[in-house]
């Protein structure tokens, strides 16, 4: 099955700086790559996603890039704020059938 | 979007007993999944709950331990059988909604299970 690796496991940045989280996947058939934010004690929430037919997608301070050849995708958060502090998970899916998650990145934004 | 509810929200159970978790969605969905999330860990897919047929289990999970029902397109149950302390975890159901060309996954609030 699909294997998704995520780095780093923890990340601390100063408020206003950028944060980058990277994921790799193993199954070249994966074509949908969502990112989730999970705050302590809450359910994961989708924050952005990208499909294999595009290389980059942006939504305000959040962007995701995809390199299909290298089988990796990244989450970029600019102008970080303390409320961005959470655990972030990447995932990979084939046509929305089964989602395989990365190991998570605990992001801390220091005011 | 989808509104998903789970019951119970949490439970404390004795070793050797079983617990059934319910998942209710406010709309009909084709894809419904069950995940386990142990403290500080990622989400691990247990199985895909298939309406009208047996669930599809991921490697490491078996039907005898985690029987799943999916009687219709809005409801599913996951049973954690013959529990041991290692089963202590948060169990989440999720659904995938197809909106145009997009497949968006939504999660239930989770069931926090503690096995003594």
Image: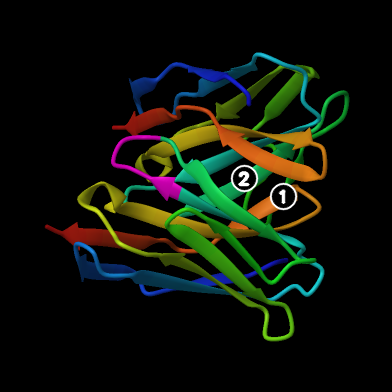
Identify the residue at image location x=45%, y=67%. Answer: A76
Identify the residue at image location x=53%, y=31%. Answer: B80
Quarter of the image with the N terminus of chain B in it:
top right
Observer-side mark, 1 or 2, equals 1
Q: Which chain carries label 1?
A: A
Q: Quadrant of residue B115?
A: top left
Image x and y of residue A81, in percent: 25, 54
The lab-note entry on whether marks 1 and 2 share a chain reads no
Q: What stretch is highlighted in magenta?
A: A37-42
Residue B4 vertical placement versus A67 (above, below): above
Quarter of the image with the C terminus of chain B in it:
top left
Residue B39 vertical placement versus B14 (above, below): below
**Scheme of colours in the image:** rainbow
Image x and y of residue A59, in percent: 53, 53
Identify the residue at image location x=34%, y=69%. Answer: A19
Depth order, front residue of B17/A111 = A111
Q: Quadrant of residue A18?
A: bottom left
Q: Residue furthest bottom?
A: A70
Image x and y of residue A71, in percent: 67, 79
Would you say the magenta stretch is mainly helix, strand or loop? loop
Depth order, front residue of B88/B72 = B72
Q: Is residue B65 something one can see in this rendering?
A: no
Q: In which quarter of the image is residue A64?
A: bottom right
Image x and y of residue A67, in percent: 67, 79
Say whether marks 1 and 2 touch (CB < 8 Å): no
Q: Which mark is residue A98?
A: 1
Q: Name the residue under label 2.
A: B46
């Amino acid at each position: 099955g699909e294997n998704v690796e995520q780095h780093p496991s923890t990340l601390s940045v100063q408020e206003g700086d950028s944060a980058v989280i990277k994921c790799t996947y193993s199954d070249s058939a994966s074509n949908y790559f969502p990112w989730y934010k999970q705050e302590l004690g809450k359910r994961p929430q989708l924050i952005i996603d990208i499909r294999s037919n595009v290389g980059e997608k942006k939504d305000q301070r959040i962007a995701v890039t995809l390199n299909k050849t290298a089988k990796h995708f990244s989450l970029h958060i600019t102008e970080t704020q303390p409320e961005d502090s959470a655990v972030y998970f990447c995932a990979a899916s084939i046509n929305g059938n089964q989602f395989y998650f990365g190991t998570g990145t605990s992001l801390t934004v220091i005011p | 979007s989808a509104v998903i509810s789970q019951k119970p929200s949490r439970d404390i159970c004795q070793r050797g007993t079983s617990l059934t978790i319910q998942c209710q969605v406010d709309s009909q969905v084709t894809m419904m999944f069950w995940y386990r999330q142990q403290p500080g860990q990622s989400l691990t897919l247990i199985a895909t709950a298939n309406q009208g047929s047996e669930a599809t289990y991921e490697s490491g999970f078996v039907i005898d331990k985690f029987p799943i029902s999916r009687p219709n397109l809005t409801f599913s149950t996951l049973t954690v059988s013959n529990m041991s302390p290692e089963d202590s975890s948060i169990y989440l159901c999720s659904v995938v909604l197809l909106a145009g060309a997009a497949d968006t996954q939504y999660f239930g609030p989770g069931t926090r299970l503690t096995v003594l």
